[in-house]
Image (cartoon, rainbow, N blue to C red):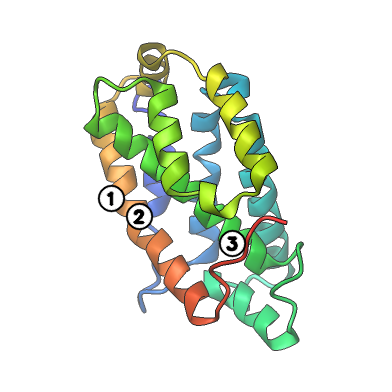
Amino acid sequence: MEGTVFAPALEQLEHVKSEQGEILTRPFLDACKHILPVIDKFGTAMGLVKSDIGGNISRLESQYSSNPSRFNCLFSLVQAEVETNTTKASSSCTNGLLWLTRAMDFLVGLFQSLIEHEDWSLSQACTESYNNTLKKWHGWLASSSFGVVMKLVPDRKKFMEVLGGGGNLNADMEKFCATLSPLLEENHKFLARLGLDDMKAS
């Protein structure tokens, strides 16, 4: 296969903004979905992260599918819940978007660490990113299970080879981080304006 495992996500990210500059639901969710095969390359270590991301994407997708024209823009999914006062329900799209954004923060941080620290092991890069992104939102249980998971991540060299495919891995990883980061930032700012960016894991 030509290109790295990031190529399909990068393709989606090119279409993620409307002409008005709004984040579109379908391309954003598709870009996130295309990262699931990347998470697979971690082996069993990231099974929880993968099912978490997959679950949040499905939740947002099913709401989007219920009315694609109404929910064409990502934030309209949250706006609808603000109107019905259901943003804080554990199965809400607001909660789904928040945790999907945080999981993507974690992955972007991880890929950036791999680019910046060529001497770091994969487990070191994961731990660094986890501490900077997800840890403060997780309770004790989630944090300790993460510590266990880190002992299972594969060897960095093997991992990078599997991700590379036939393309320039570092260039694609950098482009992915550079393109996705501002979108995640936008999600956080939008949720923060509504006072919904600091929900913790129950």
Q: At x 76% / y 69%, what residue is drawn?
A: 89
Label 3, on which residue? 97
Decide: few, some or many residues near mark 3? Use Cα within 10 Å; few <14, some 14-19, many ≥20: many
Label 2, on which residue? 181
Relative to 32, say whether 40 is above or below: above
**Left or right of residue 15: residue 62:** right
Q: For residue 156, what is the image quadrant?
A: top left
Relative to 90, say whether 152 is above or below: above
Q: At x 33% / y 61%, what residue is drawn?
A: 182
x%, y% of residue 151? 55, 19
Label 1, on which residue? 178
Q: Determine the secondary structure under disc 2.
A: helix
N-terminal of the two: label 3 or label 2?
A: 3
**Left or right of residue 2: residue 40:** right
Relative to 155, say whether 200 is above or below: below
State the CA–CA distance, disc 3 to disc 2: 15 Å
Find out whether the residues at labels 1 and 2 contact each other: C-beta distance under 8 Å. yes
**Left or right of residue 66: residue 57:** left
x%, y% of residue 28? 49, 57
Q: Is residue 174 visible?
A: yes
Q: Quadrant of the C terminus?
A: bottom right
Q: Which mark is residue 18?
A: none
State the CA–CA distance, disc 1 to disc 2: 6 Å
x%, y% of residue 36? 55, 36
